[in-house]
């Protein structure tokens, strides 16, 4: 039948993949389609394993088109220096910031990464910025990213310049992390209800959250065993 690819024929598959590359390149550079550029980057990375070309396309699509997923991936490349780009956390931070505000497929992940780098401080001239970390963790947590909710909880437990210690908010975000499947969020929330830290003591809630933490931990161990089979 015309149009069908025989995936057992190596030459036919190669021709098909080469044609895909040409098509995506045309979409990106002639039609100026940001999604076409992202497809081209994915093609170079996943099919050709050509990381330098991937980086070039990501850079173009991020800087010229402001494409969120490309900015996110470019940031990840700058973290490790992949594809011949400069290994630079400051540049990565800028890329993640663009991706966060672009509200694309990877915006929540990007907001979390901005929070991490602000919290850590290595990407910033003035060192750690807890206020910026808090702002971007909130964005990611609101988007349903459990690690950001947990990190927010930790931020409020510790307290720091610009972010006062607040155990009720710590409990709120630990509970939210737990709802999203974060083991340590459940564990911390359980302990806070047990001690009456940031809330009234509630042994029933503490026990329920502790059991949820055990359940999630068991699920994680089960998944690890499956990956190891």
Image (cartoon, rainbow, N blue to C red):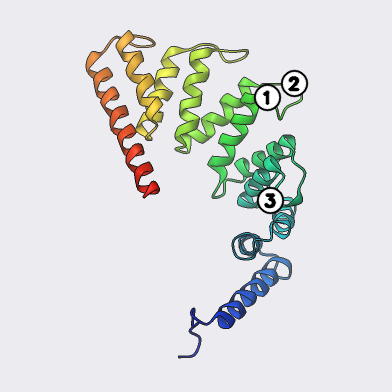
Viewer-nearest of discs 3 and 2: 2
For marks 1 and 3 on the same chain, the one whose residue lies earlier in the sequence: 3
Quarter location, residue 13: bottom right
| Dots 1, 2 in contact, CB < 8 A | yes
Which of the pair 118/102 is nearer the observer?
118
* Secondary-structure class at tag 3: loop
* Secondary-structure class at tag 1: loop
- Which residue is painted at 57% across and 83% down in the image? 12
3D distance between C-alphas at marks 3 and 2: 27 Å
- Please state if 37 lies on the left or on the right of 156 as rendered: right
Q: Position of residue 118 (x, y in %)?
A: 64, 27
Q: Where is residue 150 in the image (x, y as percent from the top left)?
A: 46, 26
* Residue 167 to residue 173: above or below: above
* Residue 192 to residue 53: above or below: above
3D distance between C-alphas at marks 1 and 3: 25 Å
For marks 3 and 2 on the same chain, the one whose residue lies earlier in the sequence: 3
Quarter location, residue 94: top right
The numbered mark at residue 85 is: none
Q: Residue most toward the front?
A: 229
Q: Position of residue 69 (x, y in %)?
A: 60, 51
3D distance between C-alphas at marks 1 and 2: 7 Å
The numbered mark at residue 126 is: 2
Which of the pair 83/165 is nearer the observer?
83
Disc 3 designates what residue? Answer: 66
- Mark 2 crowdedness (10 Å alpha carbons): few <14, some 14-19, many ≥20: few
- Mark 3 crowdedness (10 Å alpha carbons): few <14, some 14-19, many ≥20: some
Viewer-nearest of discs 1 and 3: 1
The numbered mark at residue 121 is: 1
Q: Which image quarter holds the N terminus? A: bottom left
* Secondary-structure class at tag 2: loop
- Which residue is painted at 65% across and 69% down in the image? 24
């Amino acid at each position: 039948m015309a149009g069908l690819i025989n995936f057992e024929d190596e030459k036919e598959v190669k021709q098909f993949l080469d044609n895909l590359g040409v098509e995506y390149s045309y979409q990106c550079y002639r039609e100026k389609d940001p999604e076409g550029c992202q497809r081209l980057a994915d093609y170079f990375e996943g099919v050709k394993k050509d990381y330098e070309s991937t980086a070039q396309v990501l850079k173009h699509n991020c800087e010229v088109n402001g494409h969120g997923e490309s900015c996110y991936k470019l940031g990840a490349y700058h973290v490790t220096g992949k594809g011949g780009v400069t290994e630079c956390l400051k540049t990565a931070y800028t890329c993640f910031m663009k991706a966060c505000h672009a509200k694309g497929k990877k915006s929540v992940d990007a907001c979390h990464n901005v929070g991490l780098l602000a919290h850590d401080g290595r990407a910033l001239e003035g060192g750690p910025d807890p206020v910026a970390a808090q702002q971007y963790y909130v964005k990611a947590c609101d988007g349903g990213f459990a690690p950001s909710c947990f990190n927010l909880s930790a931020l409020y437990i510790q307290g720091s310049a610009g972010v006062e210690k607040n155990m009720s908010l710590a409990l709120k975000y630990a509970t939210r992390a737990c709802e999203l499947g974060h083991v340590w969020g459940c564990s911390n929330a359980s302990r806070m209800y047990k001690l009456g830290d940031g809330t009234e003591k509630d042994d029933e809630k503490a026990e329920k959250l502790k059991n949820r933490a055990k359940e999630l931990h068991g699920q994680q161990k089960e998944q690890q065993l499956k990956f190891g089979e």
